[in-house]
Image (spheres, rainbow, N blue to C red):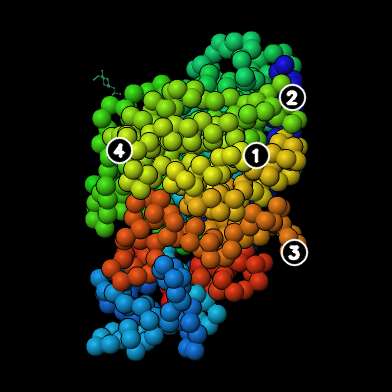
Amino acid sequence: MAKAKEAELGSNRDSTPIKRESSSTSALRWILAVLVAASLTSVLHKADFLARLRHYCASGPVMNLPNQYILCSAEGETSVYTVDEANAVKQCVGVDSGFVVSTGDLRTVQHGRNWRVYRIPPGAMVVPGLSDSHCHILEHGAARQIPFGDATSVEESVEMVASYILANPDVERNRSEAIVSWGWDHESWSAPKYPTAADLELNPISRGRRVILQSKDGHAIWVSKAILDAYAPYPDTVEGGVIMRDSSGSPTGVFFDSAQNLIEMPSISGEELSRRLHMAARDALALGLTSLHDAGFKPESMEAFKREVEAHGKLPVRVYAMTHFDEYASYWTNGTEMLHGMGDKERFSARSLKIFADGALRTSGAALYEPYSDDPGNRGQMRLSGEALQSVVNRFAKAGWQVNVHAIGDRANGLVLDAFESVLREDNKVDARETRPRLEHAQVMAEADFERIGRLGVIASVQPTHVISDMPFAEDRLGTKRVKGLYAFRSILSSGARITLGTDFPVESMDPMKTFYAAVTRRAFNVPEGEGWYPEQRLTRTEALRGLTIDPAYASFTESVLGSLESGKHADWVILSKDIMKVDMNEVLITKVLATALDGEIVFGGL
Ligand SMILES: *[C@@H]1O[C@H](CO)[C@@H](O)[C@H](O)[C@H]1NC(C)=O
Ligand SMILES: *[C@@H]1O[C@H](CO)[C@@H](O)[C@H](O)[C@H]1NC(C)=O
């Protein structure tokens, strides 16, 4: 059983495509490296290091704009995409004190205003600030704190842990502080074998420290000797999990799946949570993302974000939080208050609830009506029964919460729609427009459910880059007929439902250009032409742009103040180096963010 499980984990890992990073993300990573390199011999070659540092500096310091200004297309071009109701494209946008006050040609916007005019470079475009509708902010920050993605060996990975310790005095000083991070992938090392607790003892800096490192796919943890000893002894077998052992039978320090629960996750310090938040916000702004919908706020995340608002008056990026409902904890059911636009500039809201209906497709945990095509005894599992779902959805929707349910398999999506349908019954006085229930992922849908999602006014929150990750194995798992209901974005839209786009980062890359490309082409990143995977489900460029701007605004109750460049809205805007509505789709993947503004102020790049 253990062997079979391990084989399954192995094959899952093989089908994980290698995810690349945008150059701006890796450039930012180098800010951390600068700090580290100052204090120790870097694991990286100096020349390479300096080249990357220059690349970062080339993007220039953030510039300050006056309070009132006009931002225009290049001379003779029209490339300010407002994403208003008519998808109008204008020449210029006027900004006053953080708000859009006018759009149109220069004369119209200038009318009576003697404001400075800034022009974007030829061929570039302006779009409203982009959103990611389903992501994990602190987890991304955790993954970025230690850049395991760059490691080519276990030794390098351990050196990165050591660098992290040295770069953070609060961690270095306090030996009982645990080091918790995410993202190692032994498959990407030159000698791909599982790491061990002993590896962490070989480096004098990491030796003796409490270290817990989650694998990139989330299915394993690698711990240090101090942690391994603290939770010993271990059971011989674990239902649904595997403890990795050496030839004498002793645990080596890697735990798979439910065996991970044998190790208790330590609480993370406030300083570390704040570092994670800022790291993720910087990456997001550098990629043109101004609004993030976090799909799993735990109580400690809520505290960390609130502390940040209290300390600085506002967050560095807009955050719309889905508070995680845990079937075992009562925290969110105990009259937790909804948060509406906390702090200066109203950047932080938490008024939705996140529930898990089932597991994931990759690990055959998604709940299906019929068994998996490649695993005839298995239909996956619901994490909550249909009745439990009904009761939770009912309770929270009636109390005015937006209810967002993770649903992957067709059975999970069907049962969630049953729950939404029962709460949205007319005699219940719960209005879909007022509560805007969301299906998070809406991955595999049964034919009959497409009609319901539209009729009920449910929002589908989907992740187009998952299409690219899953297309190598999806048909084997679901069969030729059922696979047609997987990532069926066109069918969802045709039903009249709204779609909103995200990435689930750090599971996928944060880069919204990849999301745009995947939604419009349904082609792997290294395949420059062809119709794509189930091309009838592709989105148009306009639908994809709306799915990254105004639709997420609607999905977070902010469409009257965000999501488009229209008079009266917050001036969140992004300059992209190419016009992604016109260039060849392959050029979308090399499009750069030249500047990002939040509330009218440049927070990344410059003009
Ligand atoms: C050291 O870390 C531990 C574990 O996080 C914490 O309980 C303790 O308060 C810290 N000590 C100091 C001096 O910060
Ligand atoms: C929830 O409320 C109950 C009853 O008021 C209380 O006993 C319990 O401690 C609360 N739980 C949390 C996590 O706040």
Between 27 and 7, the one nearer to me in the picture: 7
Q: List the residue tagged with mark 3.
A: 529
Q: Nearer the viewer, mark 3 or mark 4?
A: 4
Q: Which labelled disc corresponds to residue 429?
A: 4
**Distance of mark 3 from mark 2, alpha carbons?**
36 Å
Q: Which residue is more in the foreground, 201 or 336? A: 336
Q: Amino acid at mark 1?
A: Asp
Disc 1 to disc 3: CB gap under 8 Å: no
Residue under label 2: 376
Q: SS at mark 4?
A: loop
Residue 604 in picture, x, y percent from top left: 42, 65
Residue 217 vs residue 375: left or right?
Answer: left
Do labels 4 and 2 touch, CB within 8 Å? no
Q: Is residue 128 left or right of residue 475?
A: left
- Image point (38%, 81%), residue name: 104
Eye-nearest disc, 3 or 2: 2
**Reading the chain from its start, which is encountered first: label 4 or label 2?**
2
Q: Is residue 184 above or below residue 587?
A: above
C-alpha distance separating marks 3 and 4: 50 Å
Q: CB at mark 1 closer than 8 A to ligand 1?
A: no
Residue position marked by numbered label 1 in the rendering: 185
Say whether mark 3 is within 8 Å of ligand 1. no
Q: Residue at x 49, y 47 (%)?
A: 454
Task: Report how far apart the C-alphas of labels 1 and 2 lie in the structure.
Answer: 30 Å
Q: Earlier in the sequence, mark 3 or mark 2?
A: 2
